[in-house]
Structures are given as C-alpha cells and as structure tokens.
Image (cartoon, rainbow, N blue to C red):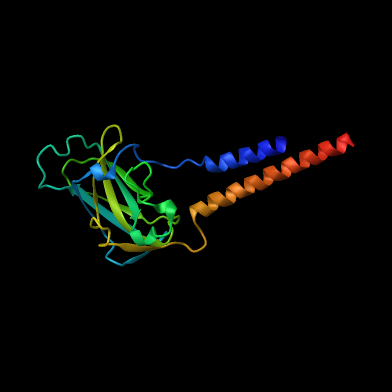
Amino acid sequence: MEKISLVLVALLLCTAVPRPSLAKGVSFASLRRTLIVSASPKQGQVLRAGEDTITVTWALNQSLPAGTDAAYKKIKVRLCYAPASQKDRGWRKTKDDLSKDKTCSFAITAQPYAGGDRSNFTYLVSKELPSGTFFVRAYAVDAADAELAFGQTTNAGKTENLFNIEGISGHHASLDVAAACFSAFSILALVAFYVQEKRGAKKK
C-alpha cells in the first residue's frame, strides 16, 4: 500500500507543474480587433532560438471612436502557433475559450497601456521554443486582467505575415520537465522497493 502511495505522489507532482492561463470564460470571438500590431520578421523568415530577436510594435487603431480604450489597463503580447504548426498536435489546439486556447502559448511581454501612443518591445527568441511557424498577437486587458480586445500580425485566416523559428535541436522545456518527472518517479520507486524488501526480510 505504501509503495502505491509513493507512486501516486510522484504522478501528482508531475501533473501539478504550474502553467500560466488566460482569464476563464472570455470568448475570443467576443473580442474586437482594435489594436494594430506589427513585428519585425518578414514573411517566411527563419529565426534561430536563443540568437535572433523580434521587435513588436502595437497601437490603438486611430479610426475607432474616442473612448474605445477606456477600460484598457495593460497590453499582453504573445507568440502564437500558425495552423501549420498545430496540425495533428492536439496540445496546441485553438479554442474559443481563452482559458483553454493553446494557440498563443508563449508570453513575449506585458506592458501598461500607453493610451493611443505607439509602443514597442524587442524580444530575444527563447531557447525553449520549439521549431515551428508563428505570428504575434496582443491582447488589451482590463483591471481584472480579462481580455477586452486584440490585434495580431496576421490576417483572420492566419495565412499572412508568418515567420519560422528554428528551435535548438534536442532541447525543449517540456522534455526537461518530463525527464525530471521520470527521474523523481524512478527514485521514489526504488525507495519504495527498498522499503518493501527490508520489511519482507524482517518478517522472515
């Protein structure tokens, strides 16, 4: 019984790895596209993880009525998978509920909203990113951190202004987590086996 308990603890530790999430209940379809967002990579350009940078620029669409951005408190910029890098990968699936959406899994920056002024940020492509095709999206959020509006570097069909990232071969954060989990599981299993053997020896 003790051996089973130790195994369950190991599995729980592995599944309890914290991950950031967006506000629950917010529907992407309900968001207005009020931000104009651009990024430095050109269509089809290949960036190397850990070496190249992406400069992202965003601003409110000035053609919108005054007061459109009255509730905007912060801009969250994220790196998002293009459809080609989501195909046959359920863990990257696009869902309308932003708390479940896996399209934009990588944070670039979060900045206080600067009114209608143009803002920018230069991001060093993380070494932890996988190889794939991407675009950039920015969310405007309110004081409760709920998404109110967005803008992105691609069109609605996510077919334009896409760029590629070449990940570092043989290394990714998810693999590190999996390796750590398996190592912890192996150690606990060995301890449980040792304890069980010692108890069996004493009974004899």
> How many marks can you see?
0
Where residue 189 sits in the image (x, y, percent)?
A: 70, 44
The residue closer to the viewer here, 172 or 203, is 203
From what the image shows, is residue 88 above or below residue 141?
below
Residue visible at 12% across and 37% down?
67
Picture coordinates of residue 55, whole percent (x, y): 28, 56
Residue 63 visible within the image: yes
Residue 158 spot, x, y in % from top left: 27, 58
Q: Name the image quarter holding residue 4.
A: top right
Q: Quick one: quadrant of the N terminus?
A: top right
* Corner quadrant of residue 191: top right
Q: Is residue 136 above or below residue 160?
A: above
- Does residue 48 appear anywhere in the picture? no
Looking at the picture, does residue 67 appear above or below residue 108? above
Question: Where in the figure is residue 79, as x and y percent of width and height?
Answer: 34, 53
Residue, x 17% and y 39% (percent of image)?
Answer: 69
Quadrant including the C terminus: top right
State left or right for residue 29 relative to residue 168.
left
